[in-house]
Image (cartoon, grey):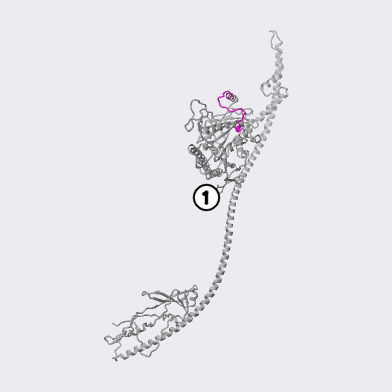
Amino acid sequence: MIRQAKGKTPRRPPPKKPSNNQKDPVGVYCRVRPLGADDEECCIEVISNTTIQLHAPDGLKANRNGEFKETQYSFKKVFGIKTTQRELFEDVAKPLTQDLIHGKNGLLFTYGVTGSGKTHTMTGSPGQGGLLPRSLDMIFNSIGPYQAKRYVFKPDDKNGMEVQNQVDALLDRQKRDSQTSVPKTPNTRRVDPEFADMISPEEACKAEGVDEDSSYSVFVSYIEIYNNYIYDLLEETPFDPIKPKWNGAGTPLRNNTEFIPPQSKILREDQNHNMYVAGCTEVEVKSTEEAFEVFWRGQKKRRIANTQLNRESSRSHSVFIVKLAQAPLDADGDNVLQDKNQVNVSQLCLVDLAGSERTSRTRAEGNRLREAGNINQSLMTLRTCIEVLRENQMCGTNKMVPYRDSKVTHLFKNYFDGEGKVRMVVCVNPKADDYEETLLVMRFAEMTQEVEVARPVDRPICGFAAGRRQRNQAFKEELTRRLEERGGPVDGDCPTVLNQLLQAFPPLPPCEISGPNDDVTLPRLIEALEKRHKIRQMMIEEYNKTATMLKSVLQEQDGNILSKENVIQEQRGKLGEKDKMLHNQKNEIDRLEKKSKMLEYKIDILQKTTNIYEEDKRSLQNELESREQRLQREMSEKRRMEARMQGMVSDTKLKWEKECERRVNAKQLEMQNKLWVKDEKLKQLKAIVTEGKTENRQPQRPSREKDKVPPKRSASPSPAPTGPPVRPLHRRSHSAGGERWVDHKPTTNVDLDTVMQPNIPNAIKVNAPNEKALSKCDKYVLTHQEVASDGEIQTKLIKGEVFKTRGGGQSVQFTDIETLKQETPVAASRKRRSSESGPDSEPMEGNWTDVETRCSVAVEMRAGSNLGPGYQHHGYTKRRKP
């Protein structure tokens, strides 16, 4: 509510506004226009009366996942392509118009891309009036009988209203009628065909609860914001036929007498810190036709300006402001109360914002590019202000809202600060070409819904008793009835009542005195005057009685009315509480419905995801079952093959074991025979050598043991003592005892095919050690082969003892190593060489080397050896005597 504070200077602090903690969110509505004939693809789908869904058109780049994301947006209400202008007005503009009549401010603006139907929504067309003409029609239908005469209310050029008395208002009306050069609102009923039949009579509506004890006047103004400059579209510019007219580009106009560019206006702040356009023309209108004709006059001027300046209407913001001034009647109920502080001014701003567009798609250049940049900048400022307001309210911050960055936001900043309700109609075009711009519009609308505006407070009551206009009318009717009872003519003017009263008195006698002795005329006149005086006294008494009776009746009626008003106030208080409760419940229901829809949407998505996962699960289960069946078949086949192979292996193993045992026995027998033959040969050779030495030895004196020089030990074994040839027995290794051995021969070993082979009886032969074999034996031997430094293969027998561990396993502790070495002797002459003796005539140790050469190999058994089974073979080169 806008009130003009009384003060002499603008520096006086404004009156404190009553605080109100109740807030309402900005009401955002969405309207979808029909798809054009040339447009084939649609990107918008209306899901419900509060939700729409945007589909990405074909050919648009997909998101990171390679899928087109479908987005949903919720509004207070969504109007589809079949929505009529009347239905839109009932939900959007009608509540704002009712608040205007009850002294509250309102802001309604349309927002959307170019060509989305904003102007059609706001203005309409013949037969389909938009929000603006329907709001004007509702205002005049509601306050028509209670309008004040023209110029009773007069703007004071400071965003306030003054109240003039009847005389000053009459003088202003006469001055307006006499001065034809001064612009005035049309009084004729001739309707322009461009806006004829905007609203049909059956669609007319009225506001409820209009204060009948107030007087109203409507003022309209029409401005345009272009390139962040404000222009008055109702301003009459004086014509100058001499001075040439130039447009904004610096070139003369087409017709020097057609158009004069208007001067830009500035914004100012009144004493109540409300913004207004200084010097803006405010025209008082008395009917819907008159108001809409003023609007159409501004539209024509706007069209002329666009034509002369080579610009489009969609490149500017248009603002149509409706101000409603109302003041209470005086105590008599005849005239408006002459008190400026009791004048309440409420206004309704209908804004048609310029269309947002992308210059990259429209390919604008030059002035068009600059215009588009200014439009986008102003809309961006509006978005920034909304975003900062939302952040301050949701996060508790106190950031400064940049209202001054744009004329649009600076002009309407009071509405967002709690001076009235704010409504926005988002117009969208479902064609696919506007998808990206529409997506930005939807995001801005979604953000705007989260901003809350303080609820405007009700205006205070002036203090007079209600029903003054009705009582004044009832008094006039009663007075007229009384006069009718007296038989006089019934007329409401005062001269007629005076004539009736004069006619009720007796006629006066002739008053001319014939002479000084005339005693008849004066007594007759005195008698007539006394009769008139008596009649006058009687009329006064009757009048007083009637007035007293009427006063008592009026007081009784006032008492009844006051009691009824008290009851009504109580009921209104209860009704207000119920309304608040219903409003809160409605908000809660809306919130729960929105939450329910969001949860349903999420459940739908989760259900789809679950179905996909279940299908994948079923397919994987089928694949797993098929693989399990195949695996079972393969396992059964493998078990059959293993059983078959085990049978074959056991048979083959048994067969080879028997064959190996037979071959080993045969080989052992053969080797025993060869050893026996060699032993016999050695015995014979030893016998021969022994006999030869015995024959050549001379008898000598026995000497002491200490004088004996020990003979040098030859590499060959010492000759056996003289005696009968006996087959020597080799000492058995400890391995040949009763212990069981684990004979570990790796498969990588090479079969040397030598005469002497290590043989361990009662042994378990394995290729790799295992716990089962170790648990049955006490000893362990590993046959290891490696290449010696001379290139021959050297075999090592690594032996150890088997112990049981605490954990129930087996461990091996290695104790000894035997080495088997094979050497290739050098070929030598088989001629026996004669033996030579030393200087002391004693035989030398190498006398029998010829025999060794012939035998090629000497076998040595180390005395006292603790080694196990195995032998050490030595091949020596024949020694030559020096």
Report the residue marked by disc 1.
63
Residue 460 image position (x, y, % from top left): 60, 34
SS state under label 1: loop
Q: Would residue 710 appear left or right of 808 to someone viewing this image? A: left
- Most extreme residue toward the left, as rendered? 839
Image quarter of residue 448:
top right
Q: Would residue 826 appear left or right of 644 to someone viewing this image? A: left
Of 511 and 702, the residue lying toward us: 702
Q: Is residue 54 above or below residue 534?
A: below
Residue 754 image position (x, y, % from top left): 41, 80
Of 578 and 442, the residue lying toward us: 442
Give the residue type at disc 1.
Asn
Magenta-drawn stretch, dominant element (helix, strand or loop) = loop
Q: Is residue 99 above or below residue 807?
A: above
Bin the neighbour count of mark 1 within 10 Å (Cα to Cα): few under 14, some 14-19, many 20 and up: few
Q: Is residue 672 above or below residue 555?
A: below
Q: Is residue 179 magenta?
A: yes
Q: Is residue 187 magenta?
A: yes
Image quarter of residue 454:
top right
Query: Quick one: quadrant of the C terminus?
Result: bottom left
Residue 738 in view in this figure: no
- Write the start and end of the magenta stretch as one range: 173-195
Image quarter of residue 152:
top right
Residue 625 image position (x, y, % from top left): 58, 63
